Image (cartoon, grey):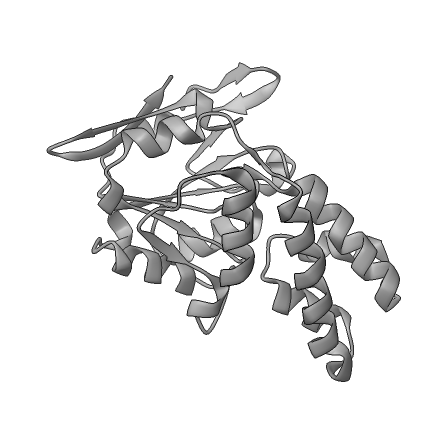
Amino acid sequence: MQRTQQRLGTLLDLDALTGRTFDGVLFDMDGTLIDTMPGAVEAWHTWAAEFGVDPAALAAVGGRPAALIVGSLLPAEQVPAGMRRIHELETAQAAAGIDVLPGVTEAFTALPANRVAIVTSCTGPLLAARLVGSGLRRPREVVCVDDVANGKPAPDPFLLGAHRIGVDPQRCLVVEDAPAGLAAGRAAGCATLAVGDTHDHSELEADGYAPDLSHVQFLSGPAGIRVALR
Protein backbone atom coordinates (compact mmCIF):
# COMPACT_ATOMS: atom_id res chain seq x y z
CA MET A 1 0.00 0.00 0.00
CA GLN A 2 1.37 3.40 -0.93
CA ARG A 3 2.26 5.82 1.83
CA THR A 4 0.27 9.03 1.74
CA GLN A 5 1.38 12.15 3.65
CA GLN A 6 -0.50 15.30 4.51
CA ARG A 7 1.32 18.62 4.31
CA LEU A 8 -0.30 22.04 4.68
CA GLY A 9 -3.64 20.26 4.66
CA THR A 10 -3.10 19.10 1.05
CA LEU A 11 -2.43 15.60 -0.19
CA LEU A 12 1.24 14.88 -0.89
CA ASP A 13 2.03 11.48 -2.41
CA LEU A 14 5.06 10.85 -4.63
CA ASP A 15 5.59 7.18 -3.81
CA ALA A 16 4.64 5.89 -7.27
CA LEU A 17 7.11 8.28 -8.92
CA THR A 18 10.17 8.33 -6.68
CA GLY A 19 11.49 4.98 -7.88
CA ARG A 20 11.29 5.91 -11.56
CA THR A 21 13.53 7.80 -13.96
CA PHE A 22 12.36 10.00 -16.81
CA ASP A 23 13.98 11.44 -19.92
CA GLY A 24 11.82 14.56 -20.06
CA VAL A 25 9.32 16.68 -18.13
CA LEU A 26 6.32 18.30 -19.80
CA PHE A 27 4.76 21.12 -17.79
CA ASP A 28 1.31 22.59 -18.16
CA MET A 29 1.47 26.35 -17.59
CA ASP A 30 -1.66 27.93 -16.07
CA GLY A 31 -2.17 26.75 -12.49
CA THR A 32 0.99 24.62 -12.68
CA LEU A 33 3.79 27.14 -13.28
CA ILE A 34 2.01 30.46 -12.91
CA ASP A 35 -1.09 31.64 -11.06
CA THR A 36 -3.45 32.88 -13.75
CA MET A 37 -6.60 31.83 -11.91
CA PRO A 38 -7.78 35.21 -10.52
CA GLY A 39 -7.29 37.00 -13.83
CA ALA A 40 -8.67 34.14 -15.91
CA VAL A 41 -11.79 33.85 -13.75
CA GLU A 42 -12.41 37.57 -14.04
CA ALA A 43 -11.83 37.50 -17.79
CA TRP A 44 -14.15 34.54 -18.38
CA HIS A 45 -16.89 35.94 -16.14
CA THR A 46 -16.72 39.25 -17.99
CA TRP A 47 -16.90 37.31 -21.25
CA ALA A 48 -19.88 35.26 -20.02
CA ALA A 49 -21.78 38.41 -19.04
CA GLU A 50 -21.11 40.02 -22.42
CA PHE A 51 -22.29 36.95 -24.36
CA GLY A 52 -25.21 36.01 -22.13
CA VAL A 53 -23.64 32.75 -20.88
CA ASP A 54 -24.43 31.37 -17.44
CA PRO A 55 -21.12 31.59 -15.49
CA ALA A 56 -21.91 28.22 -13.86
CA ALA A 57 -21.47 26.59 -17.28
CA LEU A 58 -17.79 27.55 -17.25
CA ALA A 59 -17.00 25.18 -14.39
CA ALA A 60 -17.83 22.12 -16.47
CA VAL A 61 -15.37 22.98 -19.25
CA GLY A 62 -12.33 24.17 -17.29
CA GLY A 63 -8.84 23.11 -18.35
CA ARG A 64 -9.77 22.87 -22.03
CA PRO A 65 -8.61 25.12 -24.88
CA ALA A 66 -10.57 28.36 -25.24
CA ALA A 67 -11.80 27.28 -28.69
CA LEU A 68 -13.49 24.22 -27.17
CA ILE A 69 -15.00 26.26 -24.34
CA VAL A 70 -16.29 29.01 -26.62
CA GLY A 71 -17.50 26.50 -29.20
CA SER A 72 -19.43 24.56 -26.58
CA LEU A 73 -21.12 27.62 -25.07
CA LEU A 74 -21.95 29.86 -28.05
CA PRO A 75 -23.89 29.39 -31.28
CA ALA A 76 -21.61 28.80 -34.25
CA GLU A 77 -22.14 32.27 -35.69
CA GLN A 78 -20.92 33.90 -32.46
CA VAL A 79 -17.79 31.78 -32.01
CA PRO A 80 -15.36 34.02 -33.98
CA ALA A 81 -16.41 37.11 -32.00
CA GLY A 82 -16.33 35.12 -28.78
CA MET A 83 -12.79 33.95 -29.47
CA ARG A 84 -11.55 37.45 -30.27
CA ARG A 85 -13.09 38.84 -27.10
CA ILE A 86 -11.76 36.24 -24.65
CA HIS A 87 -8.30 36.64 -26.17
CA GLU A 88 -8.51 40.41 -25.60
CA LEU A 89 -9.68 39.98 -22.01
CA GLU A 90 -7.08 37.35 -21.06
CA THR A 91 -4.21 39.25 -22.69
CA ALA A 92 -5.18 42.40 -20.80
CA GLN A 93 -5.21 40.45 -17.53
CA ALA A 94 -1.75 39.00 -18.26
CA ALA A 95 -0.30 42.47 -18.77
CA ALA A 96 -1.36 43.38 -15.23
CA GLY A 97 1.13 40.87 -13.78
CA ILE A 98 1.12 37.18 -12.92
CA ASP A 99 2.71 35.32 -10.00
CA VAL A 100 5.12 32.42 -10.54
CA LEU A 101 4.08 29.54 -8.30
CA PRO A 102 6.37 28.18 -5.54
CA GLY A 103 9.18 25.88 -6.62
CA VAL A 104 8.89 26.61 -10.33
CA THR A 105 12.10 28.60 -10.72
CA GLU A 106 14.03 25.93 -8.80
CA ALA A 107 12.54 23.18 -10.99
CA PHE A 108 13.52 24.92 -14.21
CA THR A 109 17.03 25.51 -12.86
CA ALA A 110 17.48 21.86 -11.84
CA LEU A 111 16.27 20.33 -15.12
CA PRO A 112 18.32 20.09 -18.35
CA ALA A 113 17.03 22.77 -20.73
CA ASN A 114 16.75 20.30 -23.61
CA ARG A 115 14.54 17.92 -21.61
CA VAL A 116 11.79 20.39 -20.65
CA ALA A 117 8.77 21.73 -22.51
CA ILE A 118 5.70 23.79 -21.67
CA VAL A 119 2.55 22.20 -23.08
CA THR A 120 -0.35 24.62 -22.78
CA SER A 121 -3.90 25.12 -23.98
CA CYS A 122 -3.09 28.80 -24.53
CA THR A 123 -2.68 30.31 -27.96
CA GLY A 124 0.83 31.43 -28.88
CA PRO A 125 0.18 35.15 -28.30
CA LEU A 126 -1.48 34.50 -24.93
CA LEU A 127 1.39 32.24 -23.86
CA ALA A 128 3.85 35.01 -24.73
CA ALA A 129 1.82 37.60 -22.82
CA ARG A 130 1.60 35.41 -19.73
CA LEU A 131 5.30 34.61 -19.72
CA VAL A 132 6.13 38.32 -20.02
CA GLY A 133 3.62 39.14 -17.27
CA SER A 134 5.16 36.53 -14.97
CA GLY A 135 8.83 37.06 -15.84
CA LEU A 136 9.22 33.28 -16.12
CA ARG A 137 11.97 32.12 -18.47
CA ARG A 138 10.60 30.56 -21.64
CA PRO A 139 11.96 27.04 -22.20
CA ARG A 140 13.42 26.04 -25.54
CA GLU A 141 10.37 24.00 -26.49
CA VAL A 142 6.75 25.07 -26.17
CA VAL A 143 3.56 23.48 -27.47
CA CYS A 144 0.51 25.75 -27.78
CA VAL A 145 -3.02 24.89 -28.79
CA ASP A 146 -2.24 26.41 -32.21
CA ASP A 147 0.27 23.59 -32.82
CA VAL A 148 -2.13 20.62 -32.63
CA ALA A 149 -5.31 19.45 -34.30
CA ASN A 150 -6.82 18.34 -30.98
CA GLY A 151 -6.18 20.00 -27.63
CA LYS A 152 -6.41 18.54 -24.15
CA PRO A 153 -7.89 16.09 -23.09
CA ALA A 154 -6.66 14.54 -26.37
CA PRO A 155 -3.06 13.26 -26.15
CA ASP A 156 -1.84 15.33 -29.12
CA PRO A 157 -0.24 18.20 -27.14
CA PHE A 158 1.88 15.94 -24.96
CA LEU A 159 2.80 13.64 -27.84
CA LEU A 160 4.09 16.68 -29.71
CA GLY A 161 5.89 17.98 -26.62
CA ALA A 162 7.70 14.67 -26.21
CA HIS A 163 8.58 14.64 -29.90
CA ARG A 164 10.01 18.16 -29.76
CA ILE A 165 12.39 17.28 -26.95
CA GLY A 166 13.26 14.00 -28.64
CA VAL A 167 11.90 11.70 -25.93
CA ASP A 168 9.59 8.68 -25.92
CA PRO A 169 6.29 9.82 -24.30
CA GLN A 170 6.42 6.77 -22.03
CA ARG A 171 9.67 8.19 -20.62
CA CYS A 172 8.08 11.59 -19.86
CA LEU A 173 6.55 13.02 -16.72
CA VAL A 174 3.57 15.34 -17.21
CA VAL A 175 3.02 17.97 -14.50
CA GLU A 176 -0.55 19.28 -14.52
CA ASP A 177 -3.22 20.90 -12.37
CA ALA A 178 -6.37 20.05 -14.35
CA PRO A 179 -8.34 16.86 -15.01
CA ALA A 180 -8.34 17.45 -18.78
CA GLY A 181 -4.56 17.87 -18.83
CA LEU A 182 -3.95 14.78 -16.71
CA ALA A 183 -6.25 12.79 -18.99
CA ALA A 184 -4.24 14.01 -21.97
CA GLY A 185 -0.99 12.98 -20.29
CA ARG A 186 -2.30 9.50 -19.49
CA ALA A 187 -3.61 9.10 -23.04
CA ALA A 188 -0.15 10.00 -24.36
CA GLY A 189 1.39 7.24 -22.23
CA CYS A 190 3.16 9.61 -19.82
CA ALA A 191 3.47 9.40 -16.06
CA THR A 192 1.53 12.16 -14.31
CA LEU A 193 2.05 14.47 -11.35
CA ALA A 194 -0.91 16.56 -10.19
CA VAL A 195 -0.14 19.88 -8.51
CA GLY A 196 -2.00 22.95 -7.31
CA ASP A 197 -5.40 23.68 -5.90
CA THR A 198 -7.38 24.78 -8.95
CA HIS A 199 -9.40 21.54 -8.74
CA ASP A 200 -10.49 19.32 -5.89
CA HIS A 201 -8.18 16.36 -5.36
CA SER A 202 -11.05 13.97 -6.00
CA GLU A 203 -11.09 15.17 -9.62
CA LEU A 204 -7.38 14.53 -10.22
CA GLU A 205 -6.33 11.07 -11.40
CA ALA A 206 -2.53 10.98 -11.33
CA ASP A 207 0.47 8.88 -10.32
CA GLY A 208 1.58 11.48 -7.78
CA TYR A 209 0.29 14.59 -6.03
CA ALA A 210 1.90 17.69 -4.52
CA PRO A 211 0.50 21.02 -3.30
CA ASP A 212 3.02 22.80 -5.56
CA LEU A 213 6.51 22.28 -6.94
CA SER A 214 8.20 23.57 -3.79
CA HIS A 215 7.51 20.08 -2.37
CA VAL A 216 9.18 18.33 -5.31
CA GLN A 217 12.89 18.01 -6.03
CA PHE A 218 14.05 17.19 -9.56
CA LEU A 219 17.34 15.29 -9.67
CA SER A 220 19.11 14.98 -13.01
CA GLY A 221 21.85 12.42 -13.67
CA PRO A 222 23.25 10.07 -16.32
CA ALA A 223 20.36 7.64 -15.85
CA GLY A 224 17.75 10.34 -16.30
CA ILE A 225 15.52 12.60 -14.20
CA ARG A 226 14.16 11.52 -10.84
CA VAL A 227 11.67 13.17 -8.50
CA ALA A 228 11.86 13.21 -4.71
CA LEU A 229 10.33 14.98 -1.76
CA ARG A 230 11.97 18.29 -0.99
Using the image as rendered, state which of residue 160 and residue 108 is in the foreground. 108
207 vs 161: above or below: above
122 vs 82: above or below: above
- Quarter holding the C terminus is top left
Query: Residue 111 in the image: x percent, y percent?
Result: 27, 34
Using the image as rendered, state which of residue 123 and residue 159 is in the foreground. 123
Query: Residue 225 in the image: x percent, y percent?
Result: 23, 34
Tell me which corner region of the image, top left, top right, bottom left or bottom right, holds residue 10.
Answer: top right
Residue positioned most to the bottom: 77
Give the residue drawn at x 47%, y 47%. 28
Query: Is residue 41 found left or right of 100 in the rendered image?
Result: right
Give the residue drawn at x 25%, y 33%. 20
65 vs 135: above or below: below
Query: Is residue 69 found left or right of 124 in the rendered image?
Result: right
95 vs 79: above or below: above
Query: Residue 224 in the image: x percent, y percent?
Result: 18, 36
- Quarter holding the N terminus is top left
Query: Is residue 180 found left or right of 54 in the rendered image?
Result: left
Using the image as rendered, state which of residue 5 and residue 72 is in the foreground. 72
Give the residue drawn at x 36%, y 30%. 107
Query: Residue 199 in the image: x percent, y percent?
Result: 64, 39
Give the residue drawn at x 81%, y 53%. 45
Number of labels in the image equals 0
